[in-house]
Amino acid sequence: SVSAAEARRALERFRDAATGGDLQSLLDVLAPDVVLFSDGGGVVQAARRPIHGAEKVLRFFEGLATKFGIPRFELTSVNRAPGMLVYFGEEVDGVVTLHVEDGKVTGLYYVRNPSKLSGVVEQVQLER
C-alpha cells in the first residue's frame, strides 16, 4: 500500500512521459513486470488479455497514439484514489488507475467500456 501522494507522483510521471513522447521516461516509471488490464466491454476495442511487461505495455500505448493521436491525461480521483481521465480530442476515451510499488507502476487498469464511464463523462446534478 502506498500513500495517495506517492501514487499521484507516479501518475504525474506517467502522464508527463506519455504526453511528452519521452519513451525512456515512460519505461523508467513502469516496472519491468508491469501488467496492463483493459476493459472495453465488447463495445470498444481493448486488449482481450492482460499485457505483461514494460515493452509490451509501451507498444500498446504507441498503438493507441498511432490510431487516435496523442492522448491528453487529466488527473482526477477514481473511487477515492488518484487516477486519470484519458482524452483523444475532446472526448473522454477512458479512465486509468495505477498500482504503484516502490515508485514504479506495477499495474495499469484502463477502463474504456462506455457503460462504466457514465459517472465520469456525465455531470451528476446534486440537490439538497
Image: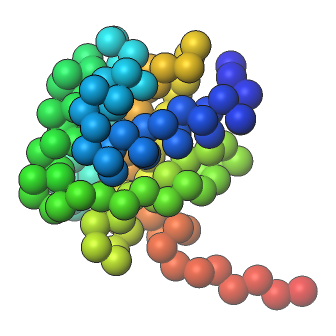
Q: Above or below — where is 43 with respect to 19? A: below
128 and 28: which is toward the camera: 28
Residue at x 55%, y 68% (from the top left corner): 119
Residue at x 69%, y 86% (from the top left corner): 125
Taking 47 as reference, is 32 left or right? Answer: right
Taking 44 as reference, is 107 left or right? Answer: right
Q: Position of residue 44 (x, y in %)?
A: 21, 59
Residue 41 showing in the rendered view: no
Q: Quadrant of residue 23?
A: top left
Taking 11 as reference, is 52 left or right? Answer: left
70 and 77: which is toward the camera: 70
Residue at x 59%, y 56% (from the top left corner): 76
Q: Position of residue 70 (x, y in %)?
A: 23, 58
Q: Position of residue 24 (x, y in %)?
A: 28, 26
113 and 93: which is toward the camera: 93
Image quarter hosting the N terminus: top right
Q: Position of residue 9 (x, y in %)?
A: 60, 35
Image quarter hosting the C terminus: bottom right
Q: Quadrant of residue 57?
A: top left
Q: Above or below — where is 61 with respect to 113? A: above
Q: Above or below — where is 38 with respect to 34? A: below
Residue 2 showing in the rendered view: yes
Residue at x 48%, y 37% (from the top left corner): 13
